[in-house]
Amino acid sequence: MIMINIKDGESLDKALKRFKKKFEKTGVMRELRSRQAYEKKSVARRTEVKHAVYIQQMHKEETV
């Protein structure tokens, strides 16, 4: 459970923003989306490799 302590004089909007940031860091929504449809391990690995290749190409273009 995520707990947010509201400081004295802090606006509700600011506290809500802190809550949302903390919630995003936990990765609950990301995991929920990934569990909605089963993905075989081979397919997951393939997409992971494609992503790694893409990132390497991006870094390669930055240095050139």
Image (tube, helix red, strand yellow):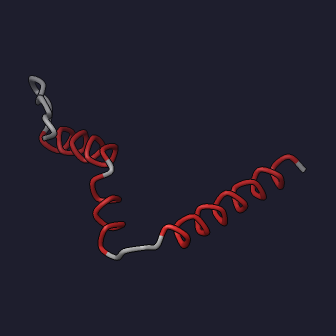
Which residue, as the protein is rendered here, is positioned at the far right? 64
Q: Quadrant of residue 55?
A: bottom right
Q: Residue at x 59, y 68 (%)?
A: 47
Left or right of residue 51: residue 9: left
Q: Nearer the viewer, residue 14 or 55?
A: 55
Residue 33 placement (x, y as % from top left): 32, 67
Which residue, as the protein is rendered here, is positioned at the far top? 8
Residue 3 placement (x, y as % from top left): 13, 35
Q: Nearer the viewer, residue 58 or 43?
A: 43
| Quadrant that contains the N terminus | top left
Residue 6 drawn above or below residue 60: above
Q: How many numbered discs sit on the rendered protein?
A: 0
Q: Residue at x 72, y 60 (%)?
A: 53
Q: Nearer the viewer, residue 40 or 4?
A: 40
